[in-house]
Amino acid sequence: MLIDLRELLSGSSQDLNKTVKLEASVFDNGVVSYDITNKEEFTVVITKLGSSKISIKANTSVTLDIPCDRCLTMVSTPIDITIDEIVDFADGASEEETQLEKDYIDGYNLDADKLLFSELLVSMPGKTLCKDDCKGLCLICGNNLNIKECGCDREVLDPRMSVFKDILNEFKEV
Ligand SMILES: [Zn+2]
Ligand SMILES: [Zn+2]
């Protein structure tokens, strides 16, 4: 959803409150793509700080389906998002920055989806596990080891173990 900022910038009012809802149903940053399973309406509070300077504030929560790092089972992950940004339309020095980093500003429009996504990216958990002691997938057959033990000999695939075995074998040969 686009919020037109021209009226706020040129008019006499100091605040613009807009209730928006994320339009996208998938969070896709080109590297990962996660389904958005829950999103709430939230209010974007835009305050004029000067003739061309605004502050943008909002709080919301988005729930994403993120696969477990070990077994790839989808984990419903609520992410709290706090937006607190300042955009200066006049400052020539920050124009490049505005274009590079603030891709949610398009001319004098604020793209609420892009704003939320840019913040979502930095609020994303570094690690996602379905449970702390997730056993992960078998590297040989792909079986989910949380559900059952497949009986594969996985030790041979661990390079650290094979080095260790080589050393043991050398000792045996001597
Ligand atoms: Zn897992
Ligand atoms: Zn297996």
Image: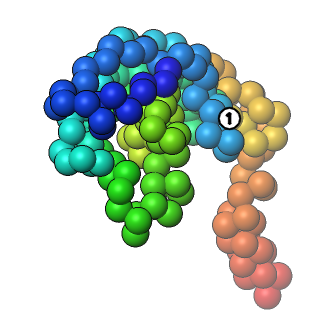
Question: Callout 1, which amino acid?
Answer: Leu
- Dot 1 falls on a residue whose secondary structure is loop
Identify which residue, 157 or 167, lies in the foreground.
Answer: 157
Which residue is label 1 attached to?
A: 137
Residue 76 shows in the view = no
Quadrant housing residue 55: top left
Would you call the spot at circle 1 few (<14 residues within 10 Å), some (14-19), or many (20 or more)? Answer: some
Give the residue drawn at x 37%, y 32%. Answer: 5
Q: Quadrant of residue 153?
A: top right
Quarter placement of the C terminus: bottom right
Residue 48 visible in rendering: yes
Q: Residue furthest front?
A: 11
Question: Relative to 17, does residue 162 appear above or below in the rendering?
Answer: below
| Residue 18 on image: x %, y % | 31, 18
Place of residue 148 in the rendered image (x, y in percent of width and height, measured from the top left): 66, 21
Give the vertical position of 84 relative to 150 (above or below): below
Q: Which residue is found at the position 50% from the left and 21% from the top?
A: 1
Residue 104 vs residue 43: left or right? right
Q: How many marks?
A: 1
Residue at 18 percent of width and 45 percent of height: 49
Report the coloring of the rendering: rainbow
* Image coords of residue 104 (percent x, y): 48, 39
> Left or right of 77: which side holds 30?
right
Horizontal side of residue 45 vs 167, given as left or right: left
Q: Residue 90, percent across and down?
A: 35, 56
* Residue at 24% over, 47% down: 51
